[in-house]
Amino acid sequence: MARRRRRISLRNVSAERNSFLRRIGLAVAFCVLAALLLVGRLVQLQIIDTQQYSTRADENRMRVVPVAPVRGLIYDRKGVLLAQNQPAFMLEVTPEQVGNMDELLSHLTEVVGLTETDIARFKDHVRKSPRYRGVTLRSNLSMEEVARYEIDRYRFPGVDINAGLTRNYPLGASAAHLIGYVGGISEDELRAAPENQYLGLTQIGKNGVEKSQEDLLRGEPGAKIIEANAYGRPLRELDYRPGYPGRNLYLSIDAQVQQVAEKAMGNFKGAVVALDPRNGELLALVSQPSFDPQLFVGGIDSATYQQLMGDPARPLFNRALQGLYPPGSTVKPTMALVGLEYGVVTPEHTEYCHGEMSLPGSARKYRCWKRSGHGPVDMADAVMRSCDIYFYNLAMNLGIDRMHEAMTAFGLGHRTEIDLPLEKAGLYPSREWKLRMRKENWYPGETLNTGIGQGYIQSTPMQLAQMVARIAMRGAGFKPHVVHATEDPITRKIEPVLPQALSKIDLKDNGSWDTVISAMEAVAQQQGGTAYAVGHNAPYRIAAKTGSAQVVGLRQDEIKAPTQESLPEHLRDHALFIAFAPAEDPKIAVAVMAEHGGHGASAAGPIARQIMDQYLLGYVLYGNESAQQPSSSVTPALVPAQQQPPGGIGENLPPEDDEDDR
């Protein structure tokens, strides 16, 4: 009993009660505080920040989906359609609605003819897209393919055919290197582009005008607002905001002139460039052989692409802008101008052409294309008859430094900066260039070769066209360009593209222009000129220069040059021809390069003549002299371009024998 009383006396009932009450109080306070915090947060969400969270909820519920704009159209200077948008049927698959994808693709191949490239591209897109979103399997289905699909449609759950627009090139391979083509956007292009630049787009310009004018042709994307569920799957369309279509382009080229040039090239590989020297507008650009740009629009299959890439004729290569060739004797008129400018020759200065020459202290022979020689020739004779010996001596007296300075001013050795992609700069050599690139000194013999357009010198047909255009304009000139005008497709307002003038080439004696242009006229108009057969019967006056650039050199002991016809085709000279007309009022300047054509006068000259006929007369007279078609003026461009009138010319020269030059 006493022990129990001790245990009771050890308990502090009052202290235990107080401790319990404190714990109860703390728990109640915590619950009240938590309730207050919860109520406060609810007040903030439901009352204070209600607008902000309502907007965010709508954003989760509604999605803005970009809509691709309609791409601008491309016309020639007369309004002939060169690139358009055509309605097309596209086969689209929604992956989440498909059970066995491989089996589906196998059955679809029997109906619509899928290629391995189509399937590989489709599977790649499927991996990168949500499974609820439709992915294009093939575009540009034919009506027959659509009909076959509709018959067996029940067999293909998750597959639909939708209508859309696809790019189409009505002229096919004609002007393909100029117009270019569109193709799918690559990951590299997406990474390199500014954010949102290609919203809604699946294709962009890949080459030609389609690429260089992408910003104008692309337009501004539209948008549609859709309602989506918590998983992002579209439920319905709430609003649609149309974009702004791309601008229509009017190019400066004449589709008729372009097609005449392509036909005139025949089976020759090569290039043609025709310019309006008064404003720099491109009238025609040909690179042969060509290709069908339509192959790239829907995605070219691997076999076809490999076939194009492996073709030894290189149809995808733009020879007009990327082809580098020795200009041969086409540089001789410009060399004559340079010689007059520096005062190392006069128009009356005469050289005696024995058919060959050597530098002092050297046994190496530098031969004229005419092995028997031309006899005494002055500057006019040298240009008209294309005497190499005259220009060897002129080059030796000028020296490579002055030649480099003057010839690059005419456009050789650097890009013309035409508004087309992939143009190459070419090369006009100098002492500094050879020392930097080859670690070698410059030799006098290299100066002689450069003086007749051989050796290290490399030029594009575009550069040769600009060079002859600057001669036609007596030193004035404009930067070549192909976009003639742009049009707003909504307002139909047309805005012309004004030409950009180049720095004028001023000569100390303006009579130098008369001297050289007269000699170029004699090339085509007087008997004995190297292009007399091409120009003597033209109803307008032509100023021209032929050229034949050697592909393979001759041995020093080879006294007589082999005829071009006796050589294998791949060893024949390249045939070149530059010209402008009418000589007294230039409206067109042309450069033609026919690979392995042999002779400039016989291979390249007729091509240039037919181009000038079509542009100046409205039809081809050359080779069809008996035709009774009346002469007609050229249909003007839809938007007249600002022009600068050229000056006059000098007198004609006496006749000589008809020969071609090297």
Image (cartoon, rainbow, N blue to C red):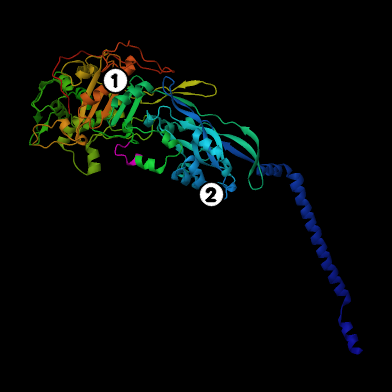
The residue located at (61%, 36%) in the rendering is 224
Relative image position of residue 80 (x, y in whole percent)? 43, 22
Residue 511 visible at all: no
Task: Determine which of the numbered discs, if any, sits on residue 32 in the image.
Answer: none
As drawn, 210 above or below 625 = below
Q: Is residue 528 left or right of residue 50?
A: left
Q: Residue at x 92, y 89 (%)?
A: 1
Horizontally, is 5 left or right of 589 in the view? right
Residue located 76% across and 46% down the image? 46
Indicate the position of residue 293 as horizontal and vertical percent values: 40, 33
Query: Dot 1: few (<14), some (14–19), or many (≥20) neighbours within 10 Å?
Result: many
Rendered image: mark on residue 101: 2
Which of labels 1 and 2 is toward the front? 2
Q: Is residue 232 magenta?
A: no
- Residue 565 quadrant: top left
**Between marks 1 and 2, how big is the CA–CA gap?**
57 Å
Q: Nearer the viewer, residue 349 or 569?
A: 569
What residue sits right under mark 1 in the picture? Answer: 610
The mark that comes first in sequence, 1 or 2, is: 2
Give the vertical position of 273 relative to 41 (above or below). Answer: above
Give the magenta-colored segment's residue range. Answer: 308-314
Q: Amino acid at mark 1?
A: Gln
Disc 2, SS = helix
